[in-house]
Image (cartoon, rainbow, N blue to C red):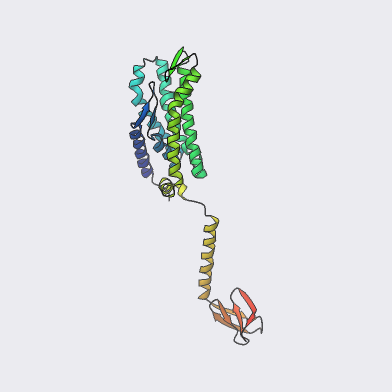
Amino acid sequence: MRQSKVRILSECAMMLALSIALSFAVIYKMPLGGAVTLFSMLPVMLVSVRHGLKWGLPTAFIYSLFQFFTGLPDMIAWSLTPGMFVASMLLDYLVAFTVLGLAGLFRKKGAVGCLVGMILACLLRFFVHYLSGILLWVNYDEFIVFGETFFNRPKLYSFLYNGSFMLPETLMTIAAAALLFFVPQAKKVVFGGTDLAAKKPTSETASTTETASNAADTSASSEEEHSVTCPCCSAHFSYRGVSGKCPYCNVLHVWGETDTNKKDK
């Protein structure tokens, strides 16, 4: 049964609100944008993991708009040129946070595939921030990161600056996701109510189903009357149930197989 779109929309809204709330739980903030937060990326990525890119990407895009408007006062304070402002808006906010919606790219591959997709989404976000650092700050002669000064090295600057908050943020997010995906009780909550909850029958399940089917056939056979020919004396007789004795030579006849050695003495 297909899930109601209203139900999924409600879930997306709740996950989006949770990500927004967690984004205010800042562990530390960088001076020119970027921060380590308390798992703020996780709820948005879970939307993509649970319901696919169709729902994950729009949810992540709305989250990126919130991040942009939250960072807008800082961008104004930096006195960026119009071109740098637009580029920063796209790379540091809209694109960087929208790629989190790609977390469900490998959702059909199980828990491991979901983790790989989330790692990829985090790496893509880092890469977009890295590009922003190279393209926007390439004309600056001097860069300072954690008290260290870098001259004319925007690539190294961007790598260190963006890695300083994206690495711990990614590690925390993936660790939390691993707990959700591999702890049975949590996994049931994460994947319950989605198309991922329908699993292919395992060999054990198939064996159990086959046994139950055979038992049902046996039960049905026990209620039927069978007319047979005795393999020993060729007499015709009838019996009800799964087995019966020939009234003439006492050979036991089992429905589905005939054992001529089972003769009463």
> Is residue 65 shown above or below 218?
above
- In the drawing, does residue 212 fall left or right of residue 14? right
Q: What residue do we see at 42% from left, 39% from top?
A: 176
- In the drawing, does residue 27 fall left or right of residue 239? left
Q: Quadrant of the C terminus?
A: bottom right
In which quadrant of the rendered view does residue 161 lie? top left
| Residue 172 visible, this angle | yes
Q: What residue do we see at 54% from left, 67% from top?
A: 214
Front residue (pair 169, 232): 169
In which quadrant of the rendered view does residue 180 lie? top left
**Residue 110 percent across, percent down from the top left:** 50, 45
**Residue 231 percent across, percent down from the top left:** 66, 80
Q: What residue do we see at 53% from left, 58% from top?
A: 204
Q: What residue do we see at 46% from left, 46% from top?
A: 182
**Residue 105 percent across, percent down from the top left:** 49, 38
**Residue 15 percent across, percent down from the top left:** 37, 39
- In the drawing, does residue 245 fall left or right of residue 57? right
